[in-house]
Image (cartoon, rainbow, N blue to C red):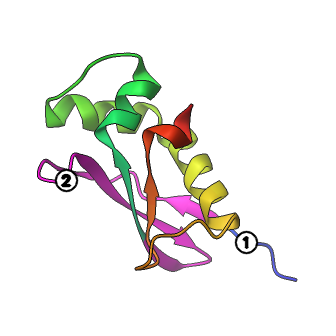
């Protein structure tokens, strides 16, 4: 069986309307749309950040851990109906 390789693209964009940061992951080259909620980012940093630049900075500082969480959700087949990965606050506790 081939080894699954998952990596995230650290280029991300804040989606103010949905309260999340969107980014892309790749599994063996296949693109997977991913997101992490603002609340999850705040929990990871221990701060209350609301500005997009603050949330993107938290994303960048925690990219490795976010990638680990996304990969765990992928391995557990915990995907959204559209095949994307959504990380919520409950996933980071």
Decide which of 8, 34 is in the foreground and name it. Answer: 34
Image point (59%, 65%), residue name: 78
Q: Which residues are magenta?
A: 6-32
Query: Which numbered mark, 1 or 2, is in the foreground of this view?
Result: 2
Which type of secondary structure does the marked residue at label 1 adopt? Answer: loop
Q: Is residue 83 magenta?
A: no
Residue at image point 64% right, 70% down: 77
**Count of numbered badges drawn on the protein:** 2
Provide the residue designation for mark 1. Answer: 4
- List the residue tagged with mark 2: 18
Q: Is residue 3 above or below residue 73?
A: below
Structural distance between the alpha carbons of marks 1 and 2: 30 Å
How dense is the environment of label 2, judged by Cα within 10 Å: few (below 14), some, or many (20 and up)?
Answer: few
| Picture quadrant where residue 92 is located | top right
Lateral position of residue 33 relative to residue 63, left or right: left
Q: Position of residue 71 (x, y in %)?
A: 62, 58
Which residue appears at 62% of the width and 66% of the height? 74
**How far from the left and from the top, in percent, is residue 37?**
34, 45
């Amino acid at each position: 069986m081939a080894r699954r390789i998952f990596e995230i693209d650290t280029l991300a964009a804040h989606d103010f309307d949905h309260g999340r940061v969107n980014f892309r992951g790749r599994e063996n080259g296949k693109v997977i749309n991913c997101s992490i909620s603002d609340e999850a980012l705040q929990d990871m940093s221990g701060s209350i950040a609301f500005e997009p630049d603050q949330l993107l900075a938290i994303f960048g500082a925690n990219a490795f851990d976010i990638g680990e969480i996304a990969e765990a959700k992928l391995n557990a087949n915990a995907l959204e109906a559209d095949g994307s990965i959504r990380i919520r606050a409950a996933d980071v506790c």
